[in-house]
Amino acid sequence: MYPDTDSGAALSDDCSRRTFLSYGASVPLLAGLSVSRTPGSGMADVRQTWSEANGITTTPIPYRDLLFGITSDGLLMATNVESEVNTWELSLGGFPYDDGLAVIGDTLLAGSSTGRLVAVEPASGDVQWQRTLSHPVMGFARDGTNVVVSSTGGLHSIALDDGRILWEAELALYRYGLSFDYVFGAVPTVVGDGVFVRTESGVTALSTSDGQLIWEQSVPKNTRDLIHGANLAVVSETIFAVSDVLRAIDIRTGDVRWTVEGEAAGRSLYNRGFVSPVTDGSSVYTGIGTVQSFNADSGATNWTGGGFPAFLNPLTYDPETTTLYVSTVAENEMKVVRMNPGAGTELWQVVVGETRSGYALSRSEISRPIPYDGSVYVACRGTSISISERELDFADSDSSTPTVSEDSGADDSEDEERNPQTTNTEQTTGPSTGEYRGLISNNPDTDIGNQLGDMYVLTLVSTALSIFVMLGQAFRRRGE
């Protein structure tokens, strides 16, 4: 990824907007973002915990009470998410690729466009070892006590304890054409004794023991230049890769199991292909002009929806909450969307920033969202943002004021996510028993939207009466 020269403190206005919770009515919450909720999606207290215009453009990496990121000019930063204080910094030089940062075991690994690779103790920021590779560093995958590092020139197997290079394999993992011809940010995937990576022409499988070739399989694209995701997804013995097609490949033999062609209408916008796929084990999620779910065994379409996904790597599946998170672009806004992966419905969406001109061509615009310990982290145009979601407790049905439970365990939205039979109609219109949860009752006609409307009218009447009384008292005193 080329550096975003406009990133930095000056971007705070772009990613700091007034906050509203929209659920039948708009209610001021907290400056920094706006939140919209699909009726019937379950209730939670969604709010921005903090945001900091720090110049970070990489995907956020949470670890215990710290959050790591790299700025567009190569400064590795650690922020305490509780105190919101930067605990340490380390200059890498150059600029970062989006996934050039990872915690493997108890070691923080970071790299930059200069080829510098460092292993850092996360809490202190002390450098344990460092190496300089011949090409820019793009991503990491754990291989037992070793780590496989992808660079723009190939793969490198490195001992995690001391940084010894065990083997290297020259591969064409990255291409930057005169227009939009990208193989971009290829992160390796280790499964068993094989390491798999997206190359310029397709997918390559190497042995983790010595880097020898096992198989190669092409992933075709049309004659136009394309921007597409380069990370892989794995379900059982099938690996998934994209260009302007989604291809399922046998992980043992490299044979093609099935291929899905992207629709030409979706590809036409900026000549883009599918975004990097993610999976929950039975379905594969990707998309071009919208988010799509495909059956992992057959390639059949499960559903289509969820907004316009940001380029390259905008998707994250969280197995703990069985939730799909998506970074999307809509007109001039960039959003984080939480989705029910079974039904393809939105649970909530958060506006986190504005695009420069109605689109987001680089990942320095918005990273993919990362859920961790009850929060969702995202980098938006040089601003790190934390979104918190807590369960609202409805146990006391007689109380008109909901209470907030710090326990972020199973809630109505999670129950709904586990039920793939839920339909869009049920999500958006139906007050069906056991699914709709208004803030006060289970009746949409008496939920918070109508109650707030009544309160608003009562407030106006009360204010008018107060003014009338005050004026009467003033005239009486004047007459006396």
Image: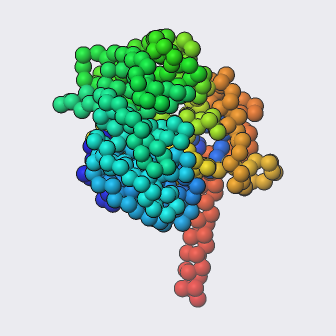
Residue, far left: 178
In this view, the residue in front, 197 or 336, is: 197
In this view, the residue in front, 377 or 291, is: 377
Residue, far bottom: 480
**Residue lying at 44% horizontally and 52% vertically, measured from the top left:** 119
Looking at the image, residue 414 lies above or below residue 78: above
In this view, the residue in front, 91 or 261, is: 91
**Residue lying at 80% horizontally and 48% vertically, measured from the top left:** 395
Counting from the top left corner in percent of width and height, residue 48 is at 52, 54
**Residue lying at 18% horizontally and 31% vertically, measured from the top left:** 178
Say left or right for 180 vs 347: left
Quadrant of res 441: top right
Q: Is residue 445 visible?
A: no
In this view, the residue in front, 207 or 190, is: 207
Say left or right for 58 vs 376: left
Q: Is residue 296 visible?
A: yes
Counting from the top left corner in percent of width and height, residue 480 is at 58, 88
Counting from the top left corner in percent of width and height, residue 128 is at 45, 57
Counting from the top left corner in percent of width and height, residue 459 is at 61, 60
